[in-house]
Amino acid sequence: VKLHRPLVVANWKMNIPEGGLSDFVASCSSNSESRPGKDIEVWIAPPFPYLSPLRAEISAFGFDAEVGAQNCSDQKTGALTGEVSAEMVSDQGAVFVILGHSERRTLFGETDALIARKITAVGMAQLVPLVCVGEDLESRERGLTAQVVTRQLRECLGPARDRFGSLVIAYEPLWAIGTGRNASAAVVVEVNQVIRKVLRDFGEESSRVLYGGSVTPENAADLARAGGADGFLIGGASLDPSKFMGICAALSPHPASPVEKS
Ligand code: PEP
């Protein structure tokens, strides 16, 4: 039984300047053929300073979406130059925080232990942690995917146990992020089973499990039909409102009929 609507999450990374926020939301809102509506849940993660301005644009256009951060500190407060706490992003209207994205892991040295502390901080601020896991190409070629993903999940969730009211996991194989090479539907289904097994061990079976990695409007329907994921985490294609809405439309269980479209 599906407990939730499919979830589509935009990770803008360090893209889209302040001047582009209004145009982005306006284009999404005017795209009535694929407007998410009640069938799809949409979350957008802009850079920190735009959480509040993006939220204002979303309400101005009556668009149905939540905002969240791409990262936050594991600490509540202190002499931590450049850091932003979970409470601070919550104050700006965020409802979720992406944690453990592969760019944070590889470019900024984040470990599973740090991600675990961030999950706790996010949960204590009543925000939803969206935790990314995924294997690199070498691990995939050596047949270690299940082992890597299971270890990441256990190390990220173990110490944070009982600290989250709600949790979203994104399976993002590193070889598929920003490469134009998406995982096949069969791989998404297979790895989701691995993730679901770990979530069951943690009593978190109602968590949503997303797929991320070169999702486009063209491949989204196939990935959605295979039924392995509860939605997508989108990087590159989330910067283009028509591609982003196209992905939402592909996930919609009730695509607009030709009559509704006209
Ligand atoms: C990502 O970075 O989370 C991601 C999925 O990127 P892309 O969609 O560009 O592969």
Image (tube, rainbow, N blue to C red):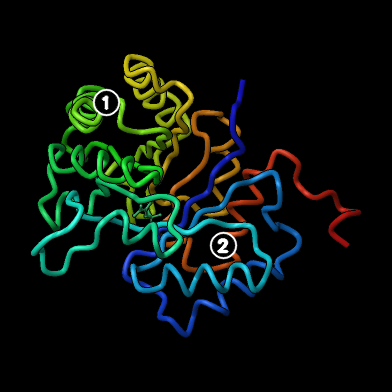
Which residue corresponds to the image point at 64% horizontal and 75% vertical from the top-left? 26
Residue annotated with mark 1? 161
Camera-nearest residue between 141 and 108: 108
Tell me where residue 41 appears, x and y as whole percent: 59, 47
Residue most extreme to the right: 259
View quadrant of ligand 1: bottom left
Specify whether residue 105 is in view.
yes
> Residue 45's mark?
none
Q: Position of residue 262 (x, y in %)?
A: 88, 62
Task: Give me the disc on residue 243.
Answer: 2
Specify few, some or many for label 1: CA neighbours under 10 Å numbering under 14, 14-19, or 20 or more.
Answer: some
Please, what secondary structure does the residue beneath circle 1 have? loop
Q: Is residue 202 above or below residue 173?
A: above
> Mark 2 falls on what kind of element?
helix
Residue at the spot x=59%, y=68% of the render?
A: 58
The disc, 2 or 1, on the residue closer to the chain's N-terminal end is: 1
Residue 14 falls left or right of residue 244: left
Could you tell me the amino acid type at mark 2? Lys
Residue at horizontal 67%, vertical 71%? 61
Residue 208 versus residue 220 in the image, above or below: above
Location of residue 104 in the rendering, given as x and y in whole percent from the top left corner: 20, 54
**Residue in the foreground of this view, choosing between 126 and 177:** 126
For the residues marked 2 and 1, what is the alpha-carbon distance in whole angstroms?
Answer: 37 Å
Three-letter amino acid code at the position of disc 1: Arg
Number of marks drawn: 2
Whether disc 1's CB lies below 8 Å from ligand 1 is answered no
> Is residue 23 positioned above or below 229 on the image?
below
Front: mark 2 or 1:
1
At horizontal 39% and vertical 44% (from top left) the residue drawn is 126
Is the Cβ of the residue at disc 2 closer than 8 Å to that at disc 1?
A: no
**Looking at the image, is 63 positioned above or below residue 188?**
below
